[in-house]
Amino acid sequence: MKHKISPFMAALLSLAMLPGMTKAQVDQSNLLGQINTITTAVPFLIISPDARAGGMGDVGVSSSPDANAIHWNPSKLAFVDKKMGFSISYTPWLRKLVPDINLAYVSFYNKLKGDQTIGASLRYFSLGNITFTDNTGAELGQFNPAEFAFDIAYARKLSENFSGGIALRYINSNLTGGFQVENNATKAGNSVAADISAYYQTEMEVSKKDAIFAVGVNISNIGTKISYTETGVKDFIPINLRLGPSLTLKLNEYNDLAFMIDFSKLLVPTPPIYNPDSVINGEQQILFGKNPDVSVASGIFNSFSDAPDGGKEELREINIAAGLEYWYDKQFAFRAGYFYEHETKGNRKYFTLGAGLKYNVFGLDFAYLIPTDQRNPLENTLRFSLVFDFDSLKKADDAE
């Protein structure tokens, strides 16, 4: 499907509203305690890519390891119980806004000797075929804005219960196809980033039931800023801290039940509040908060103390996701979850439902998103994942 849109609006549709594009002013919508959403470039990097996590409220930092662990916590790969795995996922995205935006995700892992595992993944985000126009509505041409990220990951057990992992990532974001935006030539944005993660799991007993307790932490997208023009401001990518525990109860021979919760926070500058009545050398002066034009390292460390409303606002920047997963006979799964984001920081609040079927060499996962408010662009979001188990495939071949 074709859509007429300006190059600037293409960036909006990708949710790539950049911090350098707007300044918070002192008005009724963004006084202390009011709306002050953090924005970054390439936010597709933190969209939940797979249906299993998508069915559990977008949790995954400490869930049981699978082929999609690279996104949630690369260190979990050290604890996968299969030699090799592969997953492919597809998510129609923001269909309430535009009917052909979608996210595709492919991931793979392979266990090595010495408690080591390597993995790779490719994420592709497409905005569909768009007809670009200028400010007068005249057509400039057609282009398919798209973004992708390619990852390689390595995980290793450091003890019987503890592992560490890293991932390296190349990011390409081509939103305008070289069309001019407000008389400025544009280009594809490029960045490189890394994830650093850790994972711990141990067997225990809860109410006389065997259980596995796990906790994970992942700092993702630690990387260079990105720019879409030669002379434009470079903007942060979504550096994100995610941590949380999980508990899996083995109820009996056929039934397993897992509970998990994730806490996440962007480690990038919070937009300050500017004083429109105080301008020095052409720059508005900051009334509350800190200067967001800092290095990546400074942005990470300052992100815990730079909010205009102080510690209260820092706490509001923490997103909470909670989920549960029930398995019957390790073949049929039911999932549910809830995601919470404070109303001043984006106001994403939604429930999720999911189901899974595991049959011989493959598994199929499905997830459905239910916003708490009406007319939400995330409404009716579906996710699909197909997971392949190469160990089972090899056993089937050997049996023949």
Image: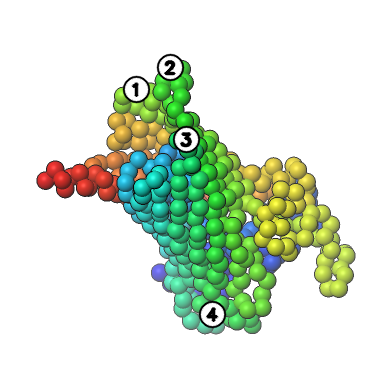
Residue underneath mark 1: 252
Lower sequence index among marks 4 and 2: 4
**How crowded is the residue under tag 2: few (<14 C-alpha within 10 Å), some, or many (20+)?**
few
Whole-Å distance between the Cαs marked 3 and 1? 23 Å
Closer mark to the observer between disc 3 and disc 2: 3
Amino acid marked by disc 3: Asn
Amino acid marked by disc 2: Lys
Residue 11: x, y in percent?
A: 57, 68
Whole-Å distance between the Cαs marked 3 and 2? 21 Å
Using the image, determine if residue 163 lies above or below residue 119.
above
Residue 269: x, y in percent?
A: 70, 56
Any part of residue 380 in sight? no
Residue underneath mark 4: 178
Residue 386: x, y in percent?
A: 32, 50
State if disc 2 and disc 3 touch (CB < 8 Å): no
Using the image, determine if residue 9 lies above or below residue 350.
below
